[in-house]
Each structure stands twice: as structure tokens, then as C-alpha cells.
Image: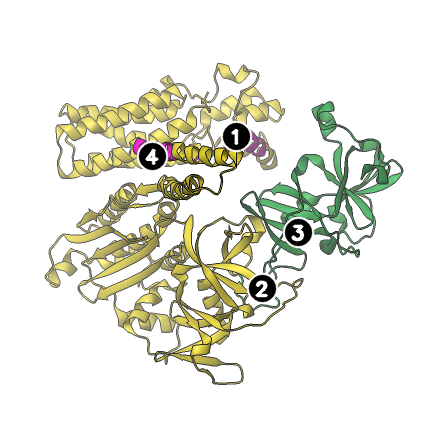
Chain colours: A green, B yellow
Amino acid sequence: MQESLGLHTVVPLESQGDAADENKYIIFALGEEYYGAKLLEVREVVEFLPTKSVPNTVPSFQGVCNLRGQIIGVVDLRIRFSIDAPKATRSVLLVFDTESGAIASSVDQIASVSVILPNDVEWRPNIVSSIPSKYIIGIGKLDQKMITIIDLKAVLSHDELTNIERSKMLVKEA
Amino acid sequence: MVDVDFLPTFLDEASETLERWESVCLKLENSASPELLDDLFRSAHNIKGSSKSVGLVEFGALVHRAEDVITRMKNGEIKPNPSAISALLECQKSLCDWVEKLRDEPTFVLPTQQILEKLSEFLQVKDPEKMQEDLGFGLFDEDLASKEPIHKDLGTILIEAGSASVQQIEDAVKLQSRRLGEVLVDTGVVTPDTIKAALEIQKGTGHKQDESIRVSLRKLDSVIRLIGELSIQHAIVCNARDVGTVNEFASVEAIGLAHKVIQDLQSEAMSLRMQTLEVLFQRMERVCRDVAMQQQKSIQVVLKGTEVELDKTVIERMKDPLVHILRNAVDHGIEDAEGRAQSEKPAIATLTIEGIQTAGNVSIRISDDGRGLNEERILRKAIERGLVSASAKPSKEEIHQMIFLPGFSTAEKVTDVSGRGVGMDVVRRAVDDLGGSIAIESRLGHGTQFLINLPSTLSIVNAVVINLSDKLYAVPVQDVEEVVDMSSVQIERTTQRGRVINLRGRILPVERLATFLPPHTQDSIQSERKSVAIIARHQSTTVALEVDGIVGQQSIVVRQLEGKLSQVPGFSGGTILASGEPSMIIHLPQIVKSYASLAK
């Protein structure tokens, strides 16, 4: 996977001190494009688990999966960010621990864990994209490639999952 | 400096000792035996000792004062009269509140001036401040300079951040009868925002408190024994696999035995979470006593079935609802002395709180011999408030259930005790959430009885697994009244949309469950088989919900849903089915409620 991207700056996880961890990003693919998320915020990376869809949820909510006995919700990022590309057959789950509990997002594949130094990042760029700009932390340069760094944890913890448009359900009181 | 490492242990111990304190005080009211006084003294003495050892100086000082009062009682210098016992109970209450606060905020200091003075009245010591001074204020001592405090108090954080000087903090602490942060803001040393930020830091360094419960050694031994047995069976199977005899009798038997052991282990493990109702009931007795005293009513509280066990979570969540019911019972249910005399009842009212164990369920019965529910008045009030239509002709039971409607309160006067318009609907919701039910029986002039039916555990549920739009879901058996084969009953159309069935003389409306749980947008549905319906009831609505099939019945382990997922309507949790696939647990009462609102 790395070769195809031509990323050379893959850092073994143990080789750097705490300070460097701040600059580590997990680089993943959604369709043709590559995105990054802060490595420290990711609880774990899980290879493909079958998900089961749940009624009364938004279209981007892929369903729930059984992660070692824990029921975890999975958000399909390609639908969430309206990325138009054929779905990978075996996606990968990035699991996050948010304040309100664990939740995962599915991505097409993990490319690498890379260091992007703060100087190589254009912070909070003012660009129009399918991803709401409040969730874009910056655009990072990694070996001549542009990586959109997303605040995935914020996306996952703020998104409402309930959608009862097609149902006759009463809404739950929070 | 408070020792945060030992604080949780101390707090658990203190809660337990304070419960003891309370029960002894309640007994002392009836008979002042020297044994009870000794018991009380021991409780106070223990807490005093351990509080000082974890550095809670002010806490210890308050207990010390109470201990002095108890000592004088023991020596016969003070009579254990109601006012003295009330003071001790009040002190116990403050200590309980303090303990709760300390769980979140290890540096919390309760203002004790008032209660100290109250206790001092019995000691004829008029200067509580003096005593406190001797003990120091505990927040700041030599530990302030220590390099790596495990838990920093607010003052230290502010000093380190340069927001306030040591002198300013110390001055503020001297004035402290309230929270340090408030004092600092009021005296203009720091802004509210700075305090907020500092408190955030404090939260971050604070320990996430783990709850603990007491477990009997017998139960623990039994769990360990079962695990031992399980590993023996496992070894047999592993060995059989290695030598290639997995299919032979010995290993098949081992697998069978292992299955039985796992079941035993599961029920033992569940029972570790069970607690007796004793502590809960004792607390309720206290509530009744306090309200009765406040209203100058004399009541006798009878506790029965305190040995019945219930899941700790269920107990915790029933605490507030029970308080509401009991407050209402004493406040509205039981007549004042005059009223009782008029209706020729014994002067002392009786209130019974009873725990009843039934198969798989636990009931709590609260009965009083008060004036009973006035159906006429309840109905009038409900109509007045627009909660029911004026033309409705509800049955007696339906009228009784009206007291649980949100916004219903029949108290003519709003009293301090009850009748704030909130309350009984909260009770209903809490019981519903637990998957329980409440029944009311009442006879005007003779009393009221609440029967609360609760599941004894929340973790393992017997469930019907159903098929809906090619997906499997679990439905707790307790929510299903009956399963009906729709091909065996006549479905009749009433209107364009409405369908009903005649089930042994009962006319029930029919609705597709998929109306409430439509397939997710990404799903493509293969088949449409509507042949089975589950009958579900919630309050006065009963409906037959069509599903695509019944797969079977199994015990499922309930997993709480996390975060936003828990807010998706229609579900109460998740589970892993025997096949390993995740499945959602359907919350039928909510579906029926949605149906009822649809029908309106």
C-alpha cells in the first residue's frame, strides 16, 4: 500500500518521543483521495467487520458491528462526505473513543502512519469542499501529495445518527 | 493534604458506616439501650479515625463533635431525646452529602458552622470556630510545595498558572465557607473564566472514580471453583484435539459439562451485582420519618422482605422514584391527626414497604392506610388540565394511572414536600425505563397501595428473536404478550388503512412493525412475508405488530448502546446473538407509545 503512494516517511511507532507523536497522522484512503487524522485520537484500527444496518438512522450510518463483544456504531465516511466512488469490498474501521462512547468510521484502506511537521501543514485553509470546513484541520504536504487532515473525532462525536423521516416513531427524549 | 489514593476506599467505608449510623439512630428513637449507643459510638469513632488518616481534617472535626455528643449520651449526661437524635441524624445527612461531593471533588469542604453549632448546643460549647482553628484548614500545608501532587487542588493550579498569589489564595481559604473558586471571583482576584479553566485542569487530573460493591466470600469462592472446573473441561477438550479424539464420548461429555459450568458461572457472576433491599428500604424509612416529622404526623414504617435481592443498578435507579411515592404517601395519603380521629382510624398511621421475590422478578409494594385516591377529584383535575378529554369515561384503574401523567398534581396547595407538579410522571418513566410496571390499588378512605414490578437483573434477558426486513432483532420476552400466527386469524379492514383482528374476542389493531422500524436506506429487501404478529401492550394501548418471522427464543446479554446510538428511537440496547452477529434490542413499549400517538 505504501509503495503505491510513494510515502517514505513511515515512522515505526516506538522510534520517536512523545513530542513527535503529536505530529503523527494516520493516512487513509476514501476513493481516490487520501486523508489524515491525528494518530493519538484513534483508539484502534480494526480490519473489516460485518456491519448490520439500523432502522431510524441517517444514511451515512452504516450500522453496528460486534467488536469483541462490544456493540459499536459505524459511520460510512464516503457517504458522510459525499465522496462518489465505488465502495471498497473490505473496508477498515478506525475506532475512536469520544466523550459519549466508542464509535467507528469505515475507510477504504489505511495507507500509512506518517509524520507531518507543523510547518508542512496549511492550517485551517479556507476552501470549499464536500467536507464542512469546520472539520478540516489543515492540508498537509507529504511527499508532494496533499493530505486533507480531518478532525474525525469531532465529526463522529457531533454527528446526530437519528433519522426518523421515513418512520412513524416518536423521537426519544434525550 | 487529602490522600487521593486512599480516598475512594475511605468513601466506600464511610458510606457504609454512615448507613449503620442512620439505622442505629432510627432504632434509638424507639429504645435507648446502652448497646445501641455503643454501636453508634463505634460508627462515629471509626469514621473519625479513618477520615483523619486520609487528611480530611474538617470532616473529622465534625464527626468528632458528634462523637462528643454520643459520649455524653453514653455517660447519661444527655438524654437521647428526639431533638438530640435529630441533630445526630442531621449530622449524618451532612456527612453523607459530603461523602458524595468528595467523590467528584476530593478537596470539597462542606460548610459545617451550622451543624457544629447545633451539636454544640448539647455540649454547651458555644465557640465552634475555636475548635476548627486548632485543627487547621487542611487545604494548604507543607504538601503545597511538593513537586508532583497526584491531585492538585484549585488553589495550587491557580498559583501555578500565575492567576493568583499564594497570599491571595490563603486569604481566600481563611474566609472560606463556600467554594474556593466563588470566593476568589467575588473578591476580584480572578475572573470566572480563569476558575473555569482551572477547574477543567483539576477534572483532568482527577481520578475517574470506580464504584465498588461488597461481595460475599461464598459467592466469590463459588465463582473461582467454577472457573477451576471450566479449565479442567477445557484441558480435556484440548487434549482430545491434540490426540485426535475430539468426537469421542469423553470430549463430547466434557463440552456438555463445560456448557453447564458456563451457565452456572453466568448466573453466579450476575448474582455478584445483586444487593439486598435493606439499605434502600432503610433510606426510605428515613424519608418517611423526616416528612412525617415535618408535618407533625405520626406514622409507623414497617419494612418487610428486606432480604430480597435486586441488581445494584435497579436499586440505584429506583431510589428517587420511591422517594417520590413515599413523600406523596405521607404528604397527601396519610391524614393529619384530626382527620384520622374523624375517620376512626388508629392515631398512628402505618406505612408498609415490602420487597417480594417472584420468579425472575422483584416487586416492591408500598401501602398506607391513609385516605386513598379520590377518583372523582383526579378525573376532574385531569380534565381541567386538559390531560384527558371531558367526554372520556375511564375505568377506575385508568383514573388511578392518571396520576402518572406529566403535569399532573392534585395537591390543592403546593407544599414544600410534594406537589411541585413534577414527580409521579418521573416515577412512571423510571419504572418504564427499567422494563417494569406499576399497579395502583386504592380504596377511598382506606388507603393506597403501589405495586412496582421490576426485573431482578438488567444484564441478561430472555428474548424472542424476530426477523424484520431480512434482519434479526431481539425483543425481550417480558414485553411480548403473545405471538399470533396471522394466517390463523381473520384480518378485517375497518377503514382504508386500519386493520384489526379478532383474537379470542379481543379486537386488536394491526400495524406493521416496519412502519416504525423501516429498512435502512442502503438495504434492499428480498422478501415480503407477513405471517406472524407479536402482541404488545403499553399502558392502555394493545397492538398486534406484524413481523416477517420468529426465529426462536434465547437468553441474550444486554449491551448498553453508546453515545448518539443510544438516542436512535425504537431500541433499548444491543446484543450479540448466538451466531456472533450484532443485533439491536427493540423497545416495544416505545413502539406501542408511538402507535398510540399515531392513532390520535
* Residue B349 on image: x %, y %: 16, 54
Q: Neighbour class for label 1 at 10 Å: few (<14), some, many (≥20)? A: some
Q: Chain letter of disc 4?
A: B
Where is residue B469? Give x, y as percent.
58, 66
Q: Amino acid at mark 4?
A: Ser
Q: Secondary structure at mark 2?
A: loop
- Mark pair 4, 2: CA separation: 42 Å
Q: Residues within 10 Å of mark 3 (few under 14, many from 20)?
A: many
Q: Which of the two residues, B395 or B434, is positioned nearer the viewer here?
A: B434
Q: How many angstroms separate mark 1 from mark 3 (CA)?
A: 32 Å
Q: Position of residue B154 (x, y in %)?
A: 53, 28
Say which residue label 2 marks: B470
Is B250 colored magenta in this rendering?
no
Q: Which residues are magenta?
A: B199-226
Question: Which residue in the structure is indicated by mark 4?
Answer: B222
Of badges 1 and 2, nearer the viewer stands 2
Q: Amino acid at mark 3?
A: Val
